[in-house]
């Protein structure tokens, strides 16, 4: 179980750092680094879903401009406040 958690953390860090646009790389990698070590497996799974969203969606989510129904989990709320 510990190996799976570490593997998931590594995937999240990598995805957050190599997104395509430099600005979102910086934003997401700093956000992920700020909370990844305090998350349990469930939180890591939520964070993994978030970092795999496209840049436009994340930018709109950050600015509270998304018109899609989004469940405001703790991770999403932390991202919006970050």
Image (cartoon, rainbow, N blue to C red):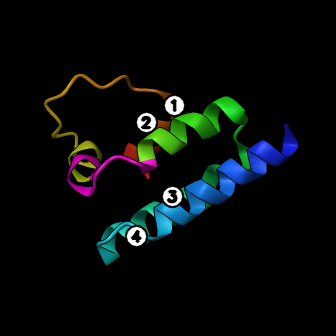
| Residue occupying image coordinates x 53% and y 34% | 46
Provide residue 65's location: percent of width, then percent of height. 15, 40
Camera-nearest residue between 44 and 62: 44
- Of mark 3 and mark 4, the one earlier in the sequence is 4
Provide residue 42's location: percent of width, then percent of height. 65, 29
Magenta residues, start to end: 51-58
How far is the residue under mark 1 from the one under mark 3?
13 Å
Camera-nearest residue between 16 and 67: 16
Q: Are marks 1 and 2 in contact (CB under 8 Å)?
A: yes
Task: Specify the principal SS of the magenta part.
Answer: helix
User: Of helix, strand and loop, which one carries label 1?
Assistant: helix
- Of mark 3 and mark 2, the one earlier in the sequence is 3
Residue topped by disc 4? 25
Residue topped by disc 1? 74
The 10 Å Cα crowd at callout 3, few under 14, some 14 to 19, many 20 or more, is some
Which mark is drawn over residue 77? 2
How far is the residue under mark 1 from the one under mark 2?
5 Å
Quadrant of the image containing the N terminus: top right
């Amino acid at each position: 179980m510990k190996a799976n958690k570490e593997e998931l953390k590594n995937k999240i860090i990598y995805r957050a750092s190599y997104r395509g646009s430099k600005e979102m790389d910086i934003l997401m990698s700093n956000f992920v680094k700020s909370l990844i070590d305090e998350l349990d497996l469930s939180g890591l799974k939520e964070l993994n879903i978030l970092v795999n969203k496209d840049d436009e969606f994340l930018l709109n989510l950050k600015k509270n401009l998304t018109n899609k129904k989004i469940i405001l989990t703790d991770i999403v709320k932390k991202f919006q406040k970050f």
